[in-house]
Image (cartoon, helix red, strand yellow):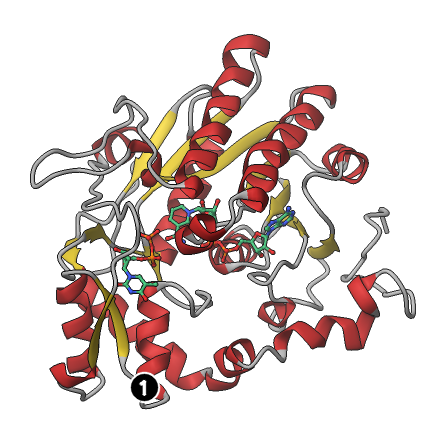
Amino acid sequence: MKLLVTGGAGFIGTNYIHYVLDTHPTDEVVVLDALTYAGNIENFQRIEHNPRFRFVKGDICDAALVDKLVQQVDAVVHIAAETHVDRSIHNADDFVRTNVLGTQVLLDACRKHFNKRFHHVSTDEVFGSLGRTGIFRENTPYEPRSPYSASKAGADHLVSAAFHTHGQAVTISNCTNNYGPYCFPEKFIPLFITNLLEGKKVPLYGDGMNIRDWIYVADHCKGIDVALRKGRNGETYCFGGRNERSNTEVAQMILFEMGYGQEMIQTVRDRPGHDRRYAIDPEKAETELGWAAETPFLHGLRKTIEWYKTNTSWWKRIKNGEYREYYEKQYGVNGITGPAPERPFDIRGEKT
Ligand code: NAD
Ligand code: TYD
């Protein structure tokens, strides 16, 4: 297969394209990514000379570019999004534009070009917030509560509408919180690990008793891939780690593994509208797709801590902003001016 992967320079996208290139020896991957603050082409160092990989810098809302790229591939794996809840509380504009409008632009191109297969990578946050009991499943009614989750819910509805209205070949997956390598250090687990590596305290929101169901990113990537290749059109698949933990518990595990005590926790003001608990029942994906989350939490957490310890320059360059200059130095401001880049960094989306 030749895949167009949107958002391939972000956390899950980077892990997914590495997974595809490593697992499917004849597959080709074209990444379309706008390189927002969350995208980082330094992530491609291991694959940038792989002839089966190509990077296009561009916006999923750019209909002409998307149209051109969709023609060149067999399927689209749509991962690009604005993703950080705290940012969406501050300003929701980019969330609505990228997550809602961008998804429709991709769907339109897929419909136009012989109904190209489309998989949407979504989140369990669209289902809202659970109390002490209950669990999210594929048929749980949507009840998003943050601008981020509302925009992802809008995207999911557009994907569903493309199936029901136009008979498009689509699937959706809704996954719980991911952790692992290449996660931008504004999210809970990498923020806590990198703060401790810098000898700084870690900010725990509210009473620390909010619960998330953590999944190792490689397990999610396998799920995305199997949903793309084996999922039935029009279906949703929920992926989760069967691994519910309170934020306090996760913070304590990180502190313990990194040799720090409780005194490094700084309790801070709670996030407005902070969802209390997320949890997924992944039974449908397990029985229908033969998928299961395999990485035990402590093992995954240790691997993640090790990755951030080994890749200090990766997250330090993010925290001090230097990673933003790398692309511009090599390819000009926004990649538009400067010397014409050669493969694989084809900024114009031309077939090479
Ligand atoms: P991320 O923020 O690390 O990466 C997002 C990527 O999308 C970045 O590379 C960014 O440059 C790119 N992007 C943003 N706007 C764009 C645009 N307009 N055009 C092209 N590219 C654009 O996000 P992530 O954590 O890797 O999440 C990826 C997807 O997975 C999202 O759709 C998210 O909703 C979903 N998801 C994430 C988690 C999680 O825990 N991180 C869990 C479930 C689902
Ligand atoms: P986050 O990684 O932002 O993911 P999401 O909000 O999408 O679940 O946050 C995970 C949990 O950690 C969430 O309950 C908020 C909490 N949190 C903190 O306690 N401190 C922090 O600095 C951050 C970023 C999150």
Residue at 71 percent of width and 27 percent of height: 109
Quarter of the figure that contains the N terminus: top right
Q: Amino acid at mark 1?
A: Lys
Instruction: From the top left corner, tell me how far across and down residue 140 is, in percent.
Output: 25, 24
Tag 1 residue? 200
Above or below — where is 243 with respect to 159?
A: below
**Which element type, helix, strand or loop, lies under badge 1?**
loop
Q: On the picture, is 332 further left or further right than 191?
A: right
Residue shown at 25%/36% (left/top)?
A: 286
The part of the image, by quadrant, that contains residue 296 is bottom left
Locate residue 268 relative to residue 50 in the image: left or right: left
Q: How many numbered marks, from 0 up?
A: 1
Q: Residue furthest left?
A: 132
In x, y percent, where is residue 183? Answer: 44, 65
Locate residue 77, reporting x and y percent: 56, 40
Q: Position of residue 214 (x, y in %)?
A: 25, 55
